Image (cartoon, helix red, strand yellow):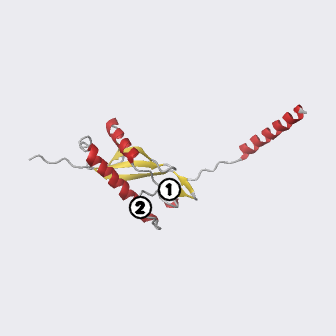
Amino acid sequence: MKTKILFLLFIFTLNSCQQHKKKKIIVEEITLNSIDLFPQYPGCKNFYEQAEQLNCLQEKIGNFINYSIKKYYKKELLQLQDSIWLTLNIDSKGKTQFINLLQSGNEPITQTKYQQIFKQIAHKIPRLKPAVYHDKPVNFQFKIPIVMPRKQATK
């Protein structure tokens, strides 16, 4: 009796493995235009238009980053050019992660101290409502321009 049960279990397992191999994995490329809802920063309204959703997100994150730079990191970041591009990812749980730091012309800024500062700032961004695609939360990566504080002229 045990042999028959084990044999049936083996056949069932073998069959399910074969069915699993037959499934095709389809990866859809999610573009900016195909997102149903952009990530929502705390304090942004539930805008209907996607352009308004994205504008509010960029404005709030930009304000947060600029405030953090001016309050905590102004001296450390004075050597950077007037404006830079920051690439961020908002994961499917709403947590913001630092990806890359670029100068104009898409040249990466590789200095570790700058990378670490922007990782710290991104880590402090409040948790967001994640982007939604086909009723499922998804990762959302985007670039945002940051205007760096200028050196003050000495008198």
Q: Residue 100's image quarter?
A: top left
Residue 28, percent from left and from top = 58, 53
32 or 53, nearer to the observer: 53
Q: Is the residue marked by circle 2 packed among few (<14), some (14-19), or many (20+) residues within 10 Å?
A: some
Q: Split into 4 quadrants, where in the image is the N terminus?
A: top right
Q: CA distance from mark 1 to mark 2?
A: 14 Å
Name the residue: 39% across, 61% down. 56
Residue 134, percent from left and from top = 58, 59
Q: Is residue 148 above or below residue 113?
A: below
Q: Is residue 130 above or below residue 7?
A: below
Residue 131 marker: 1
Q: Is residue 80 visible?
A: no
67 or 19, nearer to the observer: 67
Q: Amino acid at mark 1?
A: Ala
Q: Return the residue found at the far left.
A: 155
Name the residue: 16% across, 48% down. 152
Q: Amino acid at mark 2?
A: Cys
Horizontal side, residue 103 vs residue 129: left or right: left
Name the residue: 49% across, 54% down. 130
Horizontal side, residue 47 vs residue 82: left or right: right
Residue 150, percent from left and from top = 21, 49
Q: Return the residue found at the far bottom.
A: 48
The residue pinned by badge 2 equals: 44
Q: Is residue 97 visible?
A: yes
SS label for mark 1: strand
Q: Earlier in the sequence, mark 1 or mark 2?
A: 2
Q: Is the residue marked by circle 1 packed among few (<14), some (14-19), or many (20+) residues within 10 Å?
A: many
